[in-house]
Image (tube, rainbow, N blue to C red):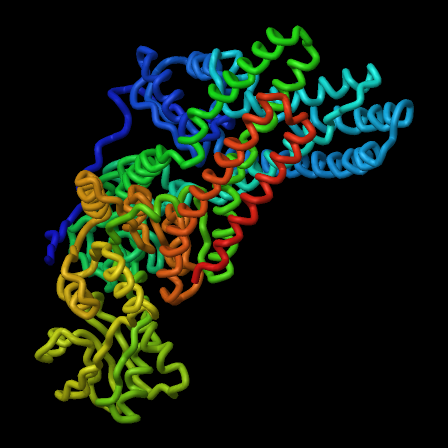
Amino acid sequence: MSVSWAPRESAPHVPNLEHGSSKVVLLSVPGMKCAACIGKIEERLSQIKGVNDPRVNLTLKRVSLSSDLPVEHLIKALQSLGYEAHPFEPSDPKINDDAISKKLILRLAVAGFAMMNVMLLSVAIWSGASDSTRDMFHLISAFIALPATIFAGQPFFHSAWTNLSKGRLNMDVPISLAILLASGMSFFESLNSGIHAYFDAGLALTFFLLIGRVLEHQTRSVARSAVADLAALEVQTARRQSGTNFVDVKAAALCVGDIVQVPNGMRVPVDGKILDRATLTDRAFITGESDPVVSQPADILHAGEVNLGAPFLLEATAVGEETNLRQIAALVETAEHTRNRYTTIADKAAKLYAPIVHLLALVTFIGWISATGDLRQALNIAIAVLIITCPCALGLAVPAVATAAVSKLFSKGVLIKSGTALERLSEVDTVVFDKTGTLTLPVRNFDLGALNKDEISVVKALAQVSSHPVSKALAEQLKDVLPSTVSSIIEIPGKGLAGMWFEQDVALGRGQWLGAPRDNLTLKIKDICKPIKSKEDLREGAVHTIAFLKRSGLDIAILSGDAQEKTATLAKTLEISNFYAEVTPVQKLQIIRSYQSKRRKVVMLGDGINDTAALAAADVSLAPGTALDAARNAADVVLLRRSFDDLPMLFRIAKATVKLSKQNFVIASFYNALAVPLAVAGFATPLLAALAMSASSITVLLNALRINLVR
């Protein structure tokens, strides 16, 4: 099936995200950790009268909403849920992210160092130390373990206290209870010459759980919003007409109706109407059209287009938030928000885990104290239950596999930016490709076989004086050719170049302008036309990848802003029946959403600004390493190598990642099924529980390494 969208003179209007006269408020909420936070925050804010459209971006840890209420009122509402919040500052995300990463790594190092030292002391006790010697080693262990545990366990303690103070439970509550009770009971035993102390158990719990927390944070922190990169493409200054002169002003100061001059090689600063002459602009970054576009006076240009011809005058028709570029950025942010609702396997498992653990430990404690009346024994057994059921393996199950998969893929030139990308990729059933820059490479190949040596040197002389992308590609291909002496060269926007060569008229341009029968690149010398055939290079590995996707039962489509004929030719070459040509960025987004409305899971591959909103809206998004910053940062996965040869392996590893993650949960569950009855029956001391917990964690880590066997 082929679909061609009608070309447009101006982009469809995107509804303003503000409600009425309400202002948009951005809040930074650094305490958000998982998909469950999104629902809690949005539900609470939606209940406040005067708050409209609250949206959470988990990756950026940011909340956006429309409201005229004081910011302090909104911050208090979030604080009532236990979330620290403050007005967003542009520099906040990166600064906060770096600070959190450093703190987690420092706490992990402290926990590991203290654990090793306490275990060395424990070896002496296990070897037969008794009485005063044993008590001394226990006290030394306490002086090492207690400060280290209090410092290293802060992420869990803070989260647990925040949730408990608001009447909620999460996984950090049983973790904190296990660590604190094991450490507190051990200190009590040490002061009372007890035989057993379990400082190493508390430190081991903290250490292994911090590993999971660090792995999760590192994969999440790589993700970055594309909105800032779209903003970076905006022109900061513009030349505004003032009387008979032009004055440099900030682009933000421009108003509708202002007349601005756009110099050669510069980006258009605002959406506007051409006033004085035909222009040639490169809008590939915005629309995906591979060839520059000729626009006539009264035509509309959009912010971000690059002037490839002579300077021209533009009357501003849309400025600031109303420009096409800003509207695309708004679409991207909305789409990113929607995708951030994805719930990971670990989130789903954790939802039921915490209350079950607490209930089991409480029942065990009540049962033993009722049966024996011995508070110390009942507490020891309850602690053992908390430790042995502590979600250490659960916390490592997904991060361990994901980290092993990310490492393997990176060695193959595939950069995974999102912690849930592989899970989502394993579920897709539809693959959508952009054409220009994704399936095809921007570099052209020219067949000069129909030209002799002198004619090739004329082509070089004409091409080297133009900044047109086709001319630049020709000049690059002919970089070793000595140009002929061609005089009086002029460039006619949208048509080509003309000059004199040994008193003969010569021209290089499109066939119709030169009287040639086809609209191909043509060299004309006097009345003789010589065609120069060109084609876009197909990205290496594209044919192999398309064949693999078809064998895997996935539906494939092409979305392109390029012309119908070029898109159809490529689709025929790759044997893809479903393609859309001449689509705008908004239309690309609409097509992705139409697939999703039919319950399809879509992966999008694109490289330009025109793909950014679609990339952000897709269930999974991929971008080649040659893509613009905005597209790379909107994508979950970046393909660093030029070839698509490793793309099939990415899909296979995604499937294997989910399979191994589920296996890890089975391992953790099997471990609990064996160990919990022993702990409840009083046969497992806290020390043995800690050793069993460590064994399950190591097993999970070893199973995760099996991802390296995937080819």
Q: Quadrant of the C terminus?
A: bottom left
**Residue 659 position in % (x across, y down):** 40, 47
Q: Position of residue 604 (x, y in %)?
A: 29, 51
Viewer-side residue, 469 vs 467? 469
Q: Is residue 640 left or right of residue 683?
A: left
Which of the 4 quarters of the picture holds residue 488? bottom left
Residue 277 visible in the picture: yes
At a point 68% along the width and 9% down the height, the residue shown is: 375
* Residue sticking out furthest to the right: 132
- Nearer to the camera, 90 or 235: 90
Decide: is 365 above or below 255: above
Q: For the N terminus, give its image quadrant.
A: bottom left
Q: Is residue 261 visible?
A: no
Tell me: residue 568, above or below residue 340.
Answer: below
Q: At 13% across and 65% down in the image, what residue appears? A: 565
Q: Is residue 98 left or right of residue 28?
A: right
In percent of the image, x 82 and y 34: which residue is there?
A: 121
**Image location (x, y in percent) of residue 163:** 51, 17
Q: Quadrant of residue 547?
A: bottom left
The answer to which of 559 and 308 lies nearer the viewer is: 559
Q: Please name the residue shown 42% across and 32% down the image.
A: 58
Position of residue 455 in the picture relative to residue 206 (left or right): left
Say which of 503 and 341 sits in front.
341
Q: Position of residue 643 (x, y in %)?
A: 38, 67
